[in-house]
Image (spheres, rainbow, N blue to C red):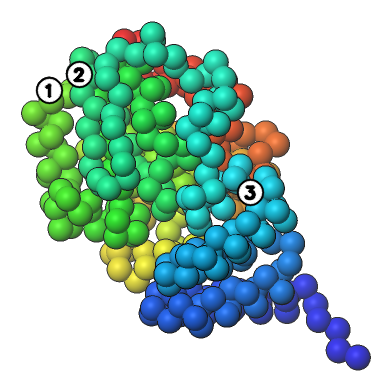
Amino acid sequence: MVTITDSQTALATEQLAKTARAAEQAGDFDRALGFFRGLCEVEPANPVWAFDAVRVLNKSGRAAEAAEALRQAMRKWPDASRRPEIRAILPVVAPSEEQHRTALGADCPPDEALKRPLIKDDASEDFIVGLGGRKAAVLVFTGLADRIVMPLPLFDRYLAELDLTAIYLRDRKRIGFFNGVKSLADDYDGTIAKLKEVLGAAGVETVHTLGNSAGGIGAVSYGIDLGARTALGFSAPVSITRQAADLDRRTAVFAERLLGDVPPERRDLRQRLMEREGATAVHLYYGSEMPEDLYHASTLDGVPGVTLHPLPGLGGHGALFRMAETGGLRNLFRETYGAA
């Protein structure tokens, strides 16, 4: 009798996932689907693979099969819509804006608290500006699902209440914003230059950055180069090294792209922050029980200007939403950005 150890199972899972994502990237959707379904058999208790299969079915144009697979997955995991890692795979399962507002309760600023109009967003733009009356702006870097856990107009309430200019950015190239924002420039340096123009034209004197999940990389990197006063990262994978990529296999293709295409000196956020000697105050929020996010944050421990904020009891990837639904996000922004 052959005994399969946990380490052998983990190795097999990692290899299957890598092969599935490579097949998807190559456009071989049938092969990718086969591997994701195989992963469902290897790890039947892990919902990620079932929702990955739904996503690939949608991507390959098999809408009816995708809808049925989604129904089955939601029956098996009825709470999937509350899990950020599932929403990142398949935004269609994300709660509605109304459901979000209900979950946020009093933490979500009401209409009468807003000092400027909210942004409008149909998810088609990678650069959205909401002009405030103050001389301060927050650049918001979205995650791989092109959101910041909640719909952007809902999140914008927090910044509109403080009359801040908000600039929302999406990374269509899926490389941590290191190749820039497509509608602004063809590369990173060009995007930095364009953002400086936009900020100057808006009369902005104080810059802040903020990013959720993969967007946290952009928040720290752009915060350094734009001379931001603060950079807030929520569940941010800020360590972009071979060791981190091997340990954190949640988005393997994304990690390999960063390692292969971004110059080491640019993705070394620790060294770049050391050189800034605390000029940008970096605050990282993450689940104390989430191993991967804890690992990433710990790699910046001890760097001047960096403060770590583990959220007790959080074992998932949703640090930003956890702060909002427990009443902490509104106060955090007031303390960080000041009152309007």
Question: From where the camera sits, is residue 270 visible?
Answer: no
Kindly give the residue lying farthest to the bottom in the view shown.
Answer: 1
Mark 2 Cα shell of 10 Å, populated few (<14), some (14-19), many (≥20): some
SS for dot 2: loop
Asked if labels 2 and 1 touch by Cβ distance under 8 angstroms, the answer is yes
Q: Which residue is mark 1?
A: 203
Asked if labels 1 and 3 touch by Cβ distance under 8 angstroms, the answer is no
Indicate whether 51 appears above or below 130: below
Mark 3 Cα shell of 10 Å, populated few (<14), some (14-19), many (≥20): many
Label 3 or label 1, whichever lies nearer to me, is 3
**Mark found first going from the N terminus, 1 or 2:** 2
Q: Which residue is mark 2?
A: 135
Please report the residue visible at 40 percent of the width from the left and 22 percent of the height from the top.
158
Tell me if 161 is positioned left or right of 65 in this view: left
**Mark found first going from the N terminus, 2 or 3:** 3
Q: Which mark is residue 91?
A: none
Query: At which x and y percent is residue 230?
Result: 35, 30
Query: Camera-side residue: 44 or 9?
Result: 44
SS for dot 3: helix
SS for dot 1: loop
Asked if labels 3 and 2 touch by Cβ distance under 8 angstroms, the answer is no
**Mark found first going from the N terminus, 3 or 1:** 3
Q: Amino acid at mark 2?
A: Lys
Query: Camera-side residue: 269 or 338?
Result: 338
Q: Amino acid at mark 3?
A: Ala
Please report the residue visible at 67 percent of the width from the left and 34 percent of the height from the top.
312
